Amino acid sequence: MSGSKIIMAGLMALLLAFSSTASAEYLIGADATSLKANIDWTNIDMNYDLTPARIRLGYQGEFFGFEIHAYSKADDISTDNGYTDKLELETSYGAYVRMQEKWVYARLGVTWFDTYYTDTNLGVTDRDVIAMPTFALGFDIPLGKNLAVNLDYTYADGRARYPNITASGPGLTDPTLRIQGPGLGLTFKF
């Protein structure tokens, strides 16, 4: 069984475990995000600004719950250090355990970022779906009984595998990819 299937099975078990909690509620939300992506190659760092929309579905028990996310497509071109490269984020997904106490919440899980990276100097494009451990800290500010404004900060870190690019560039190794930034949106709870 693959790691992603184990994580999803674990999250489903959490849903079943918490479904009998008296103060449980389901949630759905939509956010605008402003993510900074940094690709750390052997000899250079490339930085990108990505602004994908994020849809969230979840379940919150008294203290613990889970969420699944879908990110929309986004891309940016970086011209750092004399290089011009492009990072494209395709539709991406995540699964998280959620811990909440009053207005403050944290998420811990995995995000599968589907990326295309184009090295224009080498004339090579490569793709990788990167399973990245992800942590977020945020606030749900109630606007009424069922509606809240949410503000969070997400951090994800992982190793990208771009074999076409590393084979084309002298001394290149698979880069580290860090994605981090705020999200602002609305959450409906029922």
Image (cartoon, rainbow, N blue to C red):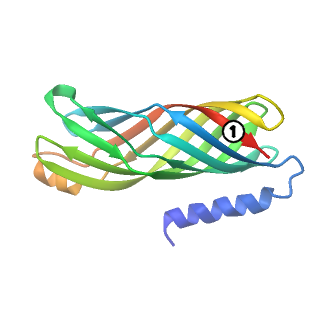
Left or right placement of residue 48 versus residue 5 in this view: left
User: x, y (%) of residue 7?
Assistant: 58, 60
In the rendering, at what x and y percent does residue 172 appear?
17, 46
Q: Residue at x 76, y 35 (%)?
A: 147
Residue pictured at 45% horizontal, 39% vertical: 52
- Left or right side of 129 for 4: right
- Residue that extends furthest to the right in the rendered view of this protein: 22
Q: Quadrant of residue 99?
A: top right
Pick the front one: 70 or 113: 70
Amino acid type at mark 1: Thr
Identify the residue at horizontal 13%, vertical 45% (top origin): 171
Q: Is residue 51 above or below residue 20?
A: above
Residue 131 point in image, percent of width and height:
44, 53
Dot 1: within a 10 Å radius of its alpha carbon, few (fewer than 14), some, or many (20 or more) residues? many
- Residue visible at 28% across and 37% down? 40
Residue 188, position as x, y percentages in the image = 73, 41
Secondary-structure class at tag 1:
strand
Q: Residue furthest bottom?
A: 1
Q: Is residue 132 left or right of residue 23?
A: left
- Find residue 98 and report its image quarter: top right
Which residue is more in the foreground, 85 or 40?
85
How many numbered callouts? Answer: 1
Q: Which residue is mark 1?
A: 187
